[in-house]
Image: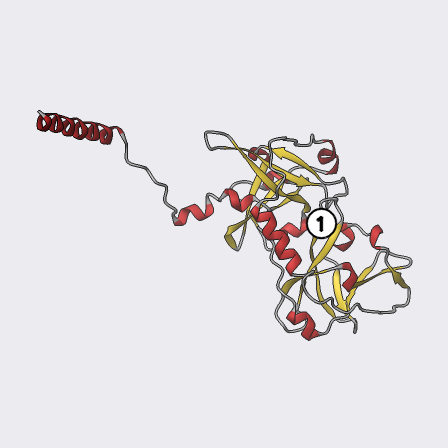
Amino acid sequence: MKRIITATAMSLMLTTSIYAAEQVKALQTYKYTDAAATSEFLASDLIGMRIYSVEENYDRFSDEYQARADEEKEWDDIGEVDDVILSFDGSVKAVVLGVGGFIGIGEKDIALPMDQLKVVREQDDAESFFLVVNANKDVLTSAEAYENPNRSSEPSEATKMADSNAEGSAASRPMLPRADVEREGYKEAVISELTAEDLQEASVYDANDEDIGEIDQLVISEDGQIQKVVMDIGGFLGIGEKPVAMTFDELQIIREDSGDDLRIYVGATKEQLEALPTYEAAQ
């Protein structure tokens, strides 16, 4: 009897296993292809990306449009992607943008559906792209802030990495000497009175008045204050152009008494500039 019961149990187990196997379908996995490089991107790619505002001729940003080299410098940098809002079916409902730092309205989060953003590819690099929105200061000021009590207050890993890169490229190294240039008709600029527009793409000079680069971007704190200045240097020094981050304490900024001309000086030597770490920000 014991043997019969065991055999019956074995039969039931085998039958159940076969039935279960018939009910479980094979997984349909997704494979990355070369074509995917220009038609999709990862959610992690969005976190930390800069957001640009373009008012004029915004309709030119079709699916086929490709930005020419450095075209983004003509747009207004208004903030970055802080988070991505997903629905339970896996679709992207909206992206959370931290805006305001560069346009003087005070940092705040707003959430925009993806269909309000344009993804603009770069002409010479199909895998590189920008996020563009049709907005201006008034629109952004009046936009309702995004507030979600369930949203983690902890910064994302991408944000932590960006902060780490920013800190490592300016704060965790010896301070560079500040220039002390006297130029007739110019006086020291008041830092608190400078705007992002004043600094963006301004030329940078060494103590001998040689043009050594230009301002590429500004690192903004949570309260909208400029923390660091990222500049592309080296082209005129023969060391190979690269982005580096410097603090205001390392820069001498003078402004023309009777005009708008702004000149930025560094007191570092060619060797000191060459030794600076390359600034890397999350894209």
Horizontal side, residue 130 vs residue 227: left or right: left
Q: Is residue 245 above or below residue 237?
A: above
Q: Is residue 235 left or right of residue 268?
A: left
Q: Look at the image and tell me whether residue 225 can be seen.
A: yes
Type of the residue with mark 1: Ile
Estimate the x, y position of residue 12 in percent, counting from the top left: 17, 26
Question: Which quarter shows the N terminus?
Answer: top left
Residue at x 63%, y 50% (from the top left corner): 72
Residue 259 x, y percent position in the rendering: 88, 57
Task: Tell me: 30 left or right of 282.
Answer: left
Label 1 element class: strand
Residue ID at (75%, 71%): 210
Q: Is residue 70 visible?
A: no
Q: Which of the two residues, 217 or 224, is positioned nearer the viewer here?
A: 224
Residue highlighted by disc 1:
220
Task: Give the percent coordinates (x, y) of residue 269.
Answer: 72, 74
